Amino acid sequence: MSSNRTTSSFVLWGVLLLAVVGALYTALSPGGLVQWFDMRRDVERLRAENEALAVENERLRAEAARLESDQAHLERVVRQELGYVRGDEVIFRFPNDVTVTEKKR
């Protein structure tokens, strides 16, 4: 009976050791739990990025619609961003490095 108990104890420890080694291998191997956690983090980052891009897309759609429907806004944007002027306007260019000082009295 003692030899039977020793054999079953040996088998139990062997199975337990095999289970621990298998769990560690699964957790630490490529494609294991470490990669799974990394992928979860990447998914969350990509979801946040997608949400931000969706907001930006909506803002750009609204801006495009406004440019198509509001002539005054279109002219204002073209003049500010592209530097366009009307035909009857005169442009004065000043050098950027001119400094103005006040006289002290």
Image (cartoon, rainbow, N blue to C red):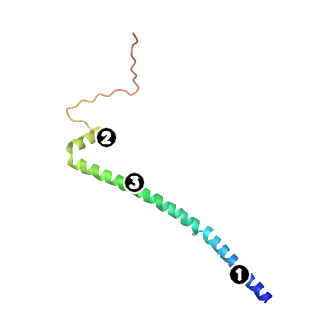
Residue drawn at x 20%, y 35% as measured from the top left: 87
- Residue 105: image tag: none
Callout 1: helix, strand or loop?
Answer: helix
Q: Quadrant of residue 31?
A: bottom right
Instruction: Between label 3 and label 1, give the one nearer the viewer.
Output: 1
Mark 1 Cα within 10 Å, few/some/many (few <14, many 20+)? few
Q: Quadrant of residue 28?
A: bottom right
- Residue 81: image tag: 2
- Residue 82 image point, x, y percent: 30, 40
What residue type is disc 3 on? Ala
| Residue designated by label 1 | 12
First-in-chain label (2 vs 3): 3
Callout 2: helix, strand or loop?
Answer: helix
Mark 2 Cα within 10 Å, few/some/many (few <14, many 20+)? few
**Direction from residue 46 to residue 34 in the image, left or right:** right
- Residue 52: image tag: 3
- Residue 25 image point, x, y percent: 64, 71
Q: Quadrant of residue 37?
A: bottom right
**Direction from residue 68 to residue 40 in the image, left or right:** right
Q: Is residue 93 visible?
A: yes
